[in-house]
């Protein structure tokens, strides 16, 4: 009996097939990347229960695109696990990582996999536009702002259940079991996993729940099973690393001598006196927004992912520190939708709520958020909305880190402001065959940061040994905006 799901194992056993017969249930396609390049591939799908704990669960479709291996002796299929939660493997394959998807075919078939509730696996899950929020002129405390989101999640939960969505099926644990069914569908002995950010969270859950079905694992920007919520003190430590990087460039060091002090000045000013901005719209009208301290902290949480974006953050806070709102207004023209109520997608909402946070970590988070530069907004609306759906939590057992002998490569960027070097090491501490490569000056999206990163991945996949402990990539000019 596998994972206690005897009836599922019996059902899926009938789908095990050879590569030749697999092609009979897949559609041959020409896959086009965003840069116009094309490659011949196969689009396939299989069905799984929406909720394996319910014997009467409806079946949902899981879709993927398979890029056949270029090797004469391919290894296990390599399954790409997108971040988010809510990203798609097929969407990622069309983007900047397309060349790496193609290069990974050297080792085996590469599966651009869309997790349940996303992309080819969305199954017409409806987006929910709640009735909460939407007043751009309302001055709100953190508690009031969080309550709007909590109310929206409760309202949307009722909306999705009324639409027939079994929300209990949208958890990382269910997604890990989907990988088991994917392996059977592909007729593979084991799977290799390749994931980033939330995709690493899912990969760690698979290592824990189906270890015998997983061979090699390549991860970047790791989010541990108990790290859905990042700790504000670790975010402050990131800002110290950012300052050190800025100090390595004389012009940037002169412009930004005290990043933390600059950020705090702007936040304190916005807390005391929010700014009323006029934001020009495409139709020629003007929309007003009362910019408050929590808005600035939310902007920060979005802009610290990679050093290129951090350059925007620095310029933004420097301009606000000088009383200049032009850059902020320009960014809001791109990002802000006037008076829009809170909208939510079911998959990412459910996944984060289910992975949750334990009581000790939540208490520490609340202490640290009170003084942290980004406050409680890095993972907003988590943990503020945790428990909004009664009983919807995978529990502390799920959040315990995986152990075992799975071979794992971890690529960790020193200027990643979303997942942190210390936290990533902790997430894989129970895996003695994990090798961590620290990529200096790289951020969250580091797969395409250098050929040395690619070489480390290929060496790991070939089991050649001699992996580096450190890689250094070029730091962008932190005085220049990337647009």
Image (spheres, helix red, strand yellow):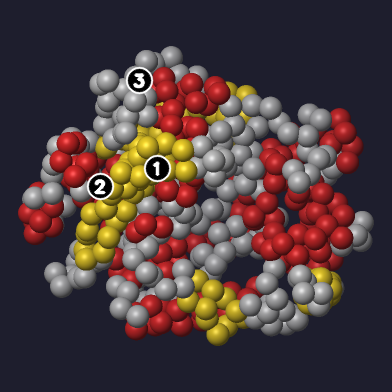
Name the residue beneath numbered marker 1.
Answer: 30
- Nearest the viewer among 163 and 301 is 163
Task: Tell me which corner region of the image, top left, top right, bottom left or bottom right, holds residue 47.
Answer: bottom left
Task: Tell me which corner region of the image, top left, top right, bottom left or bottom right, holds residue 48.
Answer: bottom left
| Residue 151 appears anywhere in the view | yes
Q: Pointer 3: residues within 10 angstroms few (<14), some, or many (20+)?
A: few
Name the residue beneath numbered marker 2.
Answer: 26
Secondary element at tag 1: strand
Residue at 92 percent of width and 56 percent of height = 322
Say which mark, if any, is on residue 462. Answer: 3
Q: Please, is residue 367 above or below residue 312 in the view?
A: below
How far across and down, in percent of the image, does residue 464 sit? 37, 15
Taking the image as shown, residue 333 lies to the left or right of residue 392, namely: right
**Which of the marked residues, 3 or 2, is nearer the chain's N terminus?**
2
Residue at 48 percent of width and 76 percent of height = 128
Q: Pointer 2: residues within 10 angstroms few (<14), some, or many (20+)?
A: some
Nearer the observer, disc 3 or disc 2? 2
- Nearest the viewer among 119 and 141 is 119
Secondary element at tag 2: loop
């Amino acid at each position: 009996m596998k994972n206690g799901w005897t009836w599922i194992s019996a059902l899926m056993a009938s789908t095990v097939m050879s590569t030749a017969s697999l092609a009979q249930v897949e559609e041959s396609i020409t896959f086009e990347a965003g840069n116009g390049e094309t490659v011949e591939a196969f689009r396939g799908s299989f069905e799984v229960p929406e909720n394996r704990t319910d014997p009467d669960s409806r079946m949902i479709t899981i879709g993927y695109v398979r890029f056949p291996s270029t090797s004469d002796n391919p290894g296990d299929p390599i399954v790409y696990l997108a971040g988010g939660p809510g990203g798609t493997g097929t969407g990622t394959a069309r983007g900047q990582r397309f060349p790496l998807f193609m290069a990974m075919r050297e080792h085996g078939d590469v599966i651009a996999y869309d997790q349940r509730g996303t992309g080819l696996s969305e199954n017409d899950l409806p987006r929910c536009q709640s009735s909460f929020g939407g007043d751009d002129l309302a001055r709100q405390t953190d508690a009031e702002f969080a309550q709007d989101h909590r109310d929206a999640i409760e309202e949307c939960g009722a909306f999705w259940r009324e639409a027939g969505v079994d929300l209990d099926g949208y958890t990382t644990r269910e997604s890990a079991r989907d990988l088991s069914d994917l392996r059977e569908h592909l007729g593979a002995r084991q799977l290799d996993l390749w994931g980033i950010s939330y995709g690493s969270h899912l990969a760690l859950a698979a290592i824990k729940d189906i270890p015998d079905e997983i061979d090699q694992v390549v991860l970047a920007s790791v989010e541990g099973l108990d790290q859905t919520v990042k700790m504000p003190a670790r975010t402050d430590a990131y800002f110290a690393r950012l300052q050190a990087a800025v100090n390595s460039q004389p012009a940037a060091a002169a412009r930004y001598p005290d990043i933390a002090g600059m950020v705090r000045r702007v936040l304190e000013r916005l807390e005391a006196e929010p700014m009323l901005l006029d934001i020009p719209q495409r139709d020629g009208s003007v929309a007003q927004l009362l910019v408050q301290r929590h808005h600035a902290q939310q902007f920060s949480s979005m802009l610290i992912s990679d050093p290129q974006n951090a350059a925007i953050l620095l310029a933004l806070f420097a301009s606000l520190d000088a009383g200049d709102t032009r850059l902020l207004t320009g960014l809001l023209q791109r990002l802000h939708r006037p008076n829009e109520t809170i909208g939510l997608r079911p998959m990412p909402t459910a996944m984060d709520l289910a992975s949750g946070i334990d009581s000790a970590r939540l208490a520490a988070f609340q202490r640290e958020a009170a003084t942290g530069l980004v406050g409680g907004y890095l993972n907003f609306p988590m943990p503020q909305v945790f428990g909004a759906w009664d009983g919807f939590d995978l529990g502390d057992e799920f959040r315990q880190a995986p152990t075992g002998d799975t071979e794992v490569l971890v690529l960790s960027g020193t200027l990643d402001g979303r997942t942190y070097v210390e936290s990533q090491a902790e997430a894989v501490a129970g895996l003695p065959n994990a090798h961590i490569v620290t990529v200096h000056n790289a951020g969250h999206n580091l797969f395409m940061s250098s050929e040395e990163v690619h070489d480390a991945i290929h060496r790991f996949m070939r089991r050649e040994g001699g992996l580096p402990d450190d890689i250094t990539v070029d730091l962008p000019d932190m005085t220049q905006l990337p647009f």
